[in-house]
Image (tube, rainbow, N blue to C red):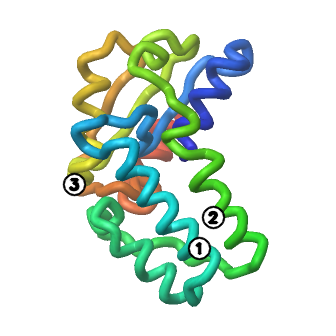
Amino acid sequence: MGGRLAMHALSAYPQRFARALLISAAPFLIEHVQTVSERAAWEETWRRKFLSEPWETLCVQWQEQSVLKSSSSPAPGRRQSVELREMLALSLTQWSLREHRITAEDVKFLPATVDYVFGALDQKYLAIAKVLRNLPVQGQITTIENAGHQILADAPDWIAQWVAK
């Protein structure tokens, strides 16, 4: 979600950005990986769970998704609140990949230098990295060995080095 929102910000306010790092970001839907109807069903299932499942059960189920299992680091804990649950449920539909469609063409014309980083153990997002590598993007596309989807937890030193550049 954050990657698409960042791309919208980069496009809408190019004068505010010289450089950006998108971490495990899916800027566009890759149809052979997940169809629009499959994505809609996934979003609705999780929206309902965020509103109704016991918090601990929900957190365990969320982390058991195959894309998140690729990370060896434990997920950060979150405190439960009604507002947080409602915001998470709403974000699945309002900030959906289906609603904020960014195309491969849009990615080519982002005004700032955008670096992308993916975990080598994150098979789903490596498909996105492969598509990005075939586009004339301004920036680097990096794959981090021994990292999964949660790169902030799996490779914090790499992130710190990028920020320090």
- Mark 1 in CB contact with mark 3 (< 8 angstroms): no
Q: Where is residue 87 in the image (x, y as percent from the top left)?
A: 71, 62
Q: Which circle marks residue 102 in the picture?
A: none
Amino acid residing under circle 3: Leu
- The residue shown at (60%, 34%) is 6
Q: Position of residue 140 (x, y in %)?
A: 36, 23
Residue 96 is drawn in which quadrant? Answer: top right
Amino acid residing under circle 2: Ala
- The residue shown at (26%, 22%) is 133
Residue at numbered disc 2: 89
Q: Position of residue 122 (x, y in %)?
A: 26, 52
Label 1 or label 3, whichever comes before in sequence order: 1
SS at mark 2?
helix
Residue 155 is drawn in which quadrant? Answer: bottom left
Q: How crowded is mark 3: few (under 14 residues within 10 Å), some or many (20 or more)?
A: many
In the image, residue 105 sits, relative to residue 20, either above or below, namely above
Q: How crowded is mark 2: few (under 14 residues within 10 Å), some or many (20 or more)?
A: many
Residue at numbered disc 1: 50
Residue at numbered disc 3: 121
Is 8 left, or right, of 139 in this rendering? Answer: right
| Front one among 161 and 31 | 31
Q: How crowded is mark 1: few (under 14 residues within 10 Å), some or many (20 or more)?
A: many
- Mark 2 in CB contact with mark 1 (< 8 angstroms): yes
- Give the CA distance from mark 2 to mark 3: 27 Å
- Give the CA distance from mark 1 to mark 3: 27 Å
Residue found farthest to the right:
83
SS at mark 3?
loop
Label 2 or label 1, whichever comes before in sequence order: 1
- The residue shown at (57%, 34%) is 100
Amino acid residing under circle 1: Phe
Q: Position of residue 120 (x, y in %)?
A: 22, 48
